[in-house]
Amino acid sequence: MAGGPGETVLVTGANGQIGTELVLALQERYGTDSVIASDLCEPSDLQGPFEICDVLDRGRLEEIVDDHGVTIIYHLAALLSATGEKNPELCERVNIGGLANVLELAKERGCRVYSPSSIAVFGPDCPKRAMQDSPLNPTTTYGATKVTGEDMAKYYWDAHGVDVRGIRYPGLISWKAPPGGGTTDYAVEVFHHALNYGSYTCFVRSETVLPMMYMDDAIRATLELMDAPSDSLGPSRACYNLAGFSFAAGELVAAIGERVEGFECTFKPDVRQKYADSWPNEIDDTVARDDWNWKPEFSMEEMVDEMLANLS
Ligand code: NAD
Ligand code: SER
């Protein structure tokens, strides 16, 4: 196992969809006081240390790492696809510039780093089932920043020995915190609308199939990858494909309809349809399974039951 109690962990972008849950999981493992959550503004309810930190402020990052003796950085601060395409310049600055600051600091201070990537690294020329080594030609700025991020992580490992690991997360479905402006947000919004209003207008077509994962599996995968012995990880150490399940938006709506009486959904695609259409339908995660024994636990049906039980 790489790392354990005795570590001090910094989480950037900790108020987001993943950070909200990852901080809790890390606190359980390392102790509440050893997990430093950080973001652009104070969270509403967090037990444990918190620091305001814009990842573009290199000096502030340095101060936090030095003050707390940080040994591992989970770098989650980013702009997601829908928000990123509205402001591509800021998306590039935060997603690439923020990571550059984290990697340089990690090199100087000897920190390990977790830096997530995304299925958005793939583009229209990718096969419907994306393999680990399928071509990376994204048509979104967000996807391009993630490809650059993977390259940067690889460079810091190859050239400087900085232990950077990462996963190409599918669309993540969760109930504790809202999603932060991605294309896959419909798969979370639909639950809230079904329970609160009995109806939803979905912004992608019914037949749109995307790779998705329940948050519990994503958090477990993140911790398992960070726990894996370094020498078990191959060249994909910072960009592992990861699969949970894939479904068409209409299939998710039908599964919710079977459980929420009277639920109705209409489909009104907007610009996010284009981003969804540019991504693969399925992910092949054989390399993650082989390198660090990854295996998902939640099926789509189990995810739907969990989401409805927790949000009801
Ligand atoms: P999110 O949008 O929910 O949270 C991101 C957080 O980063 C927000 O709290 C935001 O305030 C913060 N942030 C933005 N700019 C910042 C800055 N300059 N300095 C500091 N903080 C800043 O995102 P998330 O879903 O939690 O995603 C976390 C990471 O996982 C991102 O790298 C994202 O690309 C990746 N990812 C997420 C998904 C998903 O479905 N949620 C899928 C694939 C990859
Ligand atoms: N879920 C993310 C998004 O839709 C994919 O990285 O932006």
Image (cartoon, helix red, strand yellow):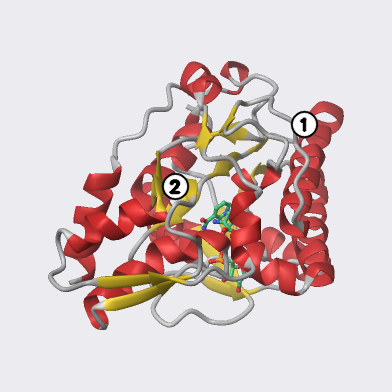
Q: Sequence-wise, which precedes: disc 2 or disc 1?
A: 1
Rendering quarter of residue 22? bottom left
Q: Is residue 88 left or right of residue 309?
A: right
Residue 14 in the image, given as x and y percentages of width and height: 53, 65
The residue closer to the viewer here, 192 or 275, is 275
Q: Is residue 6 left or right of residue 297?
A: right
Residue 212's place in the image compared with 136, above or below, is below
Residue beneath the point at 44% across and 38% down = 221
Residue 87's place in the image compared with 238, above or below, is below
Residue at the spot of label 1: 157
Residue at the spot of label 2: 212
Q: Amino acid at mark 1?
A: Trp
Q: Quadrant of ligand 1?
A: bottom right
Residue beneath the point at 41% across and 61% down = 187
Residue 165's place in the image compared with 88, above or below, is above
* Residue 116 appears in the rendering: no
Residue 155 in the image, given as x and y percentages of width and height: 83, 34
- Secondary structure category for the residue under label 2: strand
* Residue 133 appears in the rendering: yes
Residue 23 in the image, given as x and y percentages of width and height: 45, 59
Residue 93 in the image, given as x and y percentages of width and height: 83, 65
